[in-house]
Structure formats: C-alpha cells, structure tokens
Image (tube, rainbow, N blue to C red):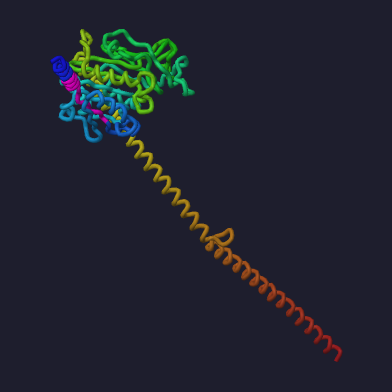
Amino acid sequence: MKKMSKTKITLGLIFLLLFMQAASAKKILIYEVGTSGKYSTTGGYSRFRQELQNQGHDVATLTRGQLTRSTLEPYDILIMQDLRKNLDTEEISSVIWFVLQKGGGLFINGDGDNRANQLSIPFGVTIDSGVLLDPSDPIPGYDEQYVFSADRFGDHAVTKKIRDGVAKIGFYKTSGLKLGVDAIDVLHGDSDTFSDTGSFPSGSQPVLSAAAYAGNGVVYVHSDAEGFSNEHIEEYHNKRLALNIVQWLAYPVDSGSSTLDVSKLKVILGELELKRQSLEQQNKLLKQEKAQALANHKLTLSQEESVKSDLAELKGSLIGPFKITNWVFILIGVVILIASFIYRKKKLGETKSTETGGEEEEKVGDLEYEMEDIL
C-alpha cells in the first residue's frame, strides 16, 4: 500500500513538473533576415537556440519577408541579434505594437552597426557607436583591451532576477548604452571602462545591458551579441545570463511605476519618421550627385577619346615632321624656285648673247673700211 502511495506521489510530481514546464514554455521568434551565418541559429548561434529548446520553449526563425502584426501575433518573445537590416516604418510599428499592445517581450542582442537603434531608441535605450575598452579586466587569451569581463550589476528588482547565478560576463568588442529615464541598468563597466570615441570617458561606468517596461510588454537590450555565440556562450556565466534574460522576458517582475508612456513613444516615433525622411532626402541628393559625377566622367572620357583619335589621325597623315599636304606645298614651292632660277639664267644668257653679237658686227664693219682704204 505504501509502495502504491509512493508511486502515485512520484507520478503526480512528474505530471506536475511536465505541466509546469508546458505552462512556462513560450513561443519565440528569432529574426534572421539579413543576419550573417555567424549569428544565425543554423550557424554560429545554434547552441543558443538549442539551450532555449532545452528549456521547453518553442523556437522558430524568420529568414525572409517582413515583420508584420500577423507575423508576430502567434509569438510571446521576439529576439533580434546583430540586426543587419534597415527596417521600414511598418516593421518598426509592428514591433512596437507587439510590445505595447500585445504584451510581448523584445530581446535586442548586439548593435548590428547601430541598426539595432531603430528599435532600441523608441524604448529609451541608445546603443553608442564607439567601442569600449577596459584595461583592468582583460579576458585571458586575448591581446586587446576591447575584450574584457564585467561584474558590476545594478540594484533594481529586474537586475536581481536577471543576475541569478551570474557573477561575471564576457564582452567581445562591445559598445556602451545610453539610457532614458525609464530604462533600467542591469550590468555596467567599472571605473576604468571607456569608449574609444570619448563618448564614455573613464569613470563613467557605461551601461552594457539594460531593461525597460513598455506598455503591456518588456524590452531587453544587451550590447554584445558575440557573448552568446557558440564560441563564447560557455565562457564565464554567458549562457546563464542569456537564459535568464529570456526567462525574464517570458515572466517579467512587477514593473511598479517604471513604464514607458505611449505618448512619449509616439513623439519618439514621429522624430524617427522625420529622421528617416531626412535620410531618404540626403540619399536622393547623393544619388543625383553621383549620377552627375558619372555623366561628367563619361564626358571627360569621350573628350579624351576624341583627342586620342585626332592624334592617331594626325600621326597617320605625317611623313617625317610634316603632313602630306605640307610636303606638296613645299615641293610646289621648290619647283617654282627651280623654274624661276632656270628662267632667270636663260634670260641672262640671251642678254649677253645679244650684246656680244653687236660688238662683233661693229668690229667687222671697221675692218671692211680699213680694207677698202688699203685697196
């Protein structure tokens, strides 16, 4: 009888654990449009996906197409690591709807050459463009100060949940985060961590990982996607932090008064739209300038070809230093000179002949007179 009771208790516990795991499982969508193989779940991020599945989560990926409300509707969490694509206004609006209205969790992992700011800024987090250095906490095996570890956490309730079991995290060429009034710092650098652009001077303790409540949902921004890759996920407590972040996005603690006002987000979205329009106008002008420069270049090339053609034609018509037509005129001039010389010589000859003949006639006449006198 006791054995039966123990068996029932064991089975009950197993069913309870399975029920709890099923209840805690979330549907996760990982956005991979434009993502390099290094950060795709079929490449350098395969272990991250496997760890999520080991936690009981249903993980899907989006590798083509656009983010829309209908695309996001079935999911509880959206993960965007190393975002390398410029999202259009509809996609940004859909993600904001997913967080504010649907109550989803958004995990922005890595800066993606600052493209991640398209989504992080509306929720009060700006990823800086500079790269951080920390000379006092280098990771062994790396020669550069851009690779360092961090162990300074904030004291918010969110931080306490996310840092559970986490003592130190590795960062591999990352950027600092600038937080709005409603964002929460979770992890930051120490007193000698600074940016190579000067945006975070030494002593500023730049934020490296942050959270935010927004409407019905939550957002988490981690500045370095490299730390959760296959190459580094087992280093320090990187894997535990990644799983804690996802767990918090699935079940965030009470936000209290720290929420992002929808009206604020509308203002931010309006500013982003104006900035987008300005960038589009700048891009249009740059294209026009490029087209004009290309047309000028083609014209210059055409002129050069014309000059080359004229030179080739000129070289083909030269005999020695002169053109054929020049040689003709020169020969005609020589012929005229020769003819003139011959003509003058001939005229001079005739003149001398005439003068000589007259003198001889006078001499003959005198001789005849003398002969007559003798006779």
Q: Residue at x 69, y 74 (%)?
A: 351
Q: Is residue 322 above or below residue 55?
A: below
Is residue 178 visible in the rendered structure shown here? yes
Is residue 100 visible in the rendered structure shown here? no
- The percent position of residue 104, horizontal first and vertical second, equals 19, 21
* Displayed quadrant of residue 271: top left
State left or right for residue 68 relative to residue 237.
Answer: left
State left or right for residue 173 relative to residue 243.
Answer: right
Q: Is residue 88 above or below residue 192?
A: below
- The percent position of residue 245, horizontal first and vertical second, equals 28, 18
* Displayed quadrant of residue 156: top left
- The reply to whether the magenta stretch includes residue 106 is no
Q: Quadrant of the C terminus?
A: bottom right
Q: Residue at x 33, y 36 (%)?
A: 287
Residues drawn in magenta:
12-31
Q: How many marks?
A: 0
Prevailing secondary structure class for the magenta stretch in the rendered image: helix
Is residue 326 or residue 243 the one in the foreground?
Answer: 243
Q: Quadrant of the N terminus?
A: top left
* Displayed quadrant of residue 82: top left
- The percent position of residue 133, horizontal first and vertical second, equals 44, 18
**Extreme-front residue of the structure:** 1
- The reply to whether the magenta stretch includes residue 18 is yes
State left or right for residue 80 relative to residue 134.
Answer: left
Is residue 220 or residue 10 the one in the foreground?
Answer: 10
Is residue 372 or residue 293 the one in the foreground?
Answer: 293
**Extreme-bottom residue of the structure:** 375
- The percent position of residue 373, horizontal first and vertical second, equals 84, 88
